[in-house]
Amino acid sequence: MPDLLIELFSEEIPARMQSRAAADLQKLVTDGLVEAGLTYAHAAAFSTPRRLTLAVEGMLGASPRTVEERKGPKADAPEKAVEGFLRGAGVTRDQVEERETPKGTILFARIERPGRPAAEIVAEVLERTIRGFPWPKSMRWGDGALKWVRPLHSIICLITDDSGATVVPLELDGIRADDSTRGHRFMAPGPITVTGFEDYEAKLARAFVTLNPQARADTIWNDATNAAFASGMTVVEDAGLLAEVAGLVEWPVVLMGPIADEFLDLPPEVLQTSMREHQKFFSVKNPKTGRIEKFITVANRTTADEGATILAGNEKVLSARLSDAKFFWENDLRVATSDKGMQTWVDALSNVTFHNRLGTQAELIDRMALLARDLAPTVGAAPDVAEQAARLAKADLNSEMVFEFPELQGLMGRYYAEAARLPTEVAAAAQEHYAPLGPSDAVPTAPVSIAVALAEKIDKLTGFWAIDEKPTGSKDPFALRRAALGVIRILVENDVSLAVRFQLFSPLLGHLIREGSGGNTVESAAVIEGIKRLGYQHKADELRTLIERDAVVLSIDMAEKAIADAETKTDDLVAFLHDRLKVYLRDQGIRHDVIDACIAMEGGDDLTLLVKRARALNDVLKTDDGENLIQGFKRANNILTQAEEADGVEYSFGADIKFSETDEERALFAALDTAEARIKPAMAAQDFAAAMSAMAELRGPIDAFFDAVQVNSDNGTIRRNRLNLLSRIRTICTSVADLTRIDG
């Protein structure tokens, strides 16, 4: 069976686009071939800075002949209906067959399509692919209309079978497909004629082009680590940089050079970031000193002087870049260690907008400080230290280093806080309060860092909820889903018990007050009274401080509206956190219905306890007793619900064992007494595993009861007693979780 080779040779393709482009080429071409009837055995795509390549093995030599029978209208249908059928089938009236069916005489068309040669189909598919290729950005050049990411120079389109290689006839805007390409731009720029993929790959290798990007990455990493090891050092891992550099060269040559002594005292992260962002250099660390002392660059060619000239030029450019970094570092240190210290940067943040409806960065910091102080006792932090840490956590945003390298925010704050001899907890919080930045990122564990990280995320969530800037569909411009997951992970992974509904209400109301006030000059007693009326007495003093500090004035109507809106938005935000929690627990193998059963219970806004309850219930439901208990519970609940609806009463007045008629009935009474005696203290102690285990032990007595007892007895007293017994089953089981929400 024939093989197909395609190469699209152009000027340099940006490294960030290469991997996606190779995948797009493979999908577009192979999907087009299959749609046209050309199946294949295997396909693989490759990319280098100057070429996209697709190799297809075991392709059919031609599409198969097909025969299709198409049913049409009745023979006596209106003329226009018949003409439309004939036109769609591509046949004439004398080519259709009339058949008698139960619905009358129907027209049938037999449509035969002959097979087409592979070359004809490949040419059509490839032209359509090239003209409609989904580059993020593309360009036109010269006088042609063809668009490509960079000027396209040549096309290989070659079908190879037992008889040899054949060029597919194809021409696009003056570029005619052939069987030739070029090697390395500098070391082998001449034309190369190929006969198939194996010949193509081998000749490119001899022409100093490594076709496979993974092979280039492996070469870079192996040579880099070997060079560093020979000097007693290690290369700092950077998978993103490795993939990018592999897309910058066709023939990687690793060179290692020194960093000038005057820059070695810069923080290692500054050196690494500067070299990665500006020069695409790898950092080489001395494990004995922990400092980055060398760099690795990857050239695109070998040279007679073994890279000495290339290294010298890179060292010169690197020194200029690091001189800038050193200048920023020293200037920032002078500010951080001055009399006013990092507060200089905090004050300047009053001129930096956080969001046009949520105020400046300085106002954000004030809100974070209040929240961190409020959260501190819950997480075991000193309130004064938590507030200080929150006020300085974002100070480095105004530093010169972070202005140049925004990705160093937080980290530089830690360095500057340490230089200013601030408490260790304050310095750590500056770096850690942004965490976690992703699902694999570690959460902060120090109490002060926890308080500040929670404050930052809660303020973000409540702020954007207050102004109705919530995520919609796949859009989440303010990373609120990430903030919500951060709150969940910080609480759960640090075993922090927090009633989030209570904690979200106050900042939400604060945002709504600021949003709805005229920014004038008097405290609103109505807001304070409203808070007390809604049962938030312990927040009243805090909100009075907030209102007086912001000097707002509200009418009574505005105050009541703000309170009502805060309640509604709090409920909505808690539901959003629950949705994020479902995603978090689903990834851990916990069923959605289990989570729903636990969310429905009182205290469902304490995310840590909710997770413990869900895990315990999930574990029980994995056992036979747990799964069968659900069936018994649902049977009891269904019988009870139907009886209550039919009788118009609620059976919850307590069953009496003296009306029992069978041993199974009496055994169920005893089992319920035992379970209740174990479940109540276990739930009070938040020992959900013990409570679930006690509940699961009811499986046997409940099954035996239903096997031996008819609930709807002819004796009305016995029937009512048994229904009240079922009510007790429901009450005890739903005290652990709302089992009505469990599937099955």
Image (tube, helix red, strand yellow):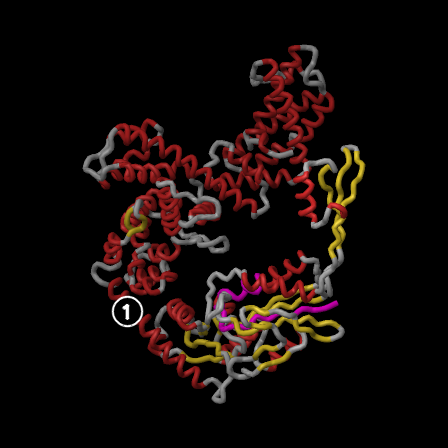
Which residue is situated farthest in the right direction here?
100
Which residue is situated farthest in the bottom direction here?
304
Q: Which residues are magenta?
A: 1-24
Q: Horizontal and vertical percent for residue 100?
A: 80, 36
Q: Viewed as shown, does residue 364 lie left or right of 67?
A: left
Q: In the rendered view of the protein, which quadrant contains the C terminus?
A: top right
Q: Splitting the image into 4 quarters, where does residue 398 fall?
A: bottom left
Q: Horizontal and vertical percent for residue 630?
A: 64, 32
Residue 186 vs 352, above or below: the answer is below
Q: Is residue 36 magenta?
A: no
The answer to whether any part of residue 390 appears in the image is: yes
Q: Horizontal and vertical percent for residue 101?
A: 79, 35
Residue at 65% x, 35% y is 626
Q: Which residue is mark 1?
A: 330
Q: Viewed as shown, does residue 248 lie left or right of 539?
A: right
The answer to whether any part of residue 495 appears in the image is: no
Residue at 60% x, 81% y is 192
For mark 1, give the secondary structure.
helix
Q: In the rendered view of the protein, which quadrant contains the N terminus?
A: bottom right
* Mark 1 residue type: Glu
Residue at 64% x, 59% y is 32
In the image, 699 versus 208, the foreground residue is: 208
Residue 89 vs 716, above or below: the answer is below
Q: Viewed as shown, does residue 192 lie left or right of 478?
A: right
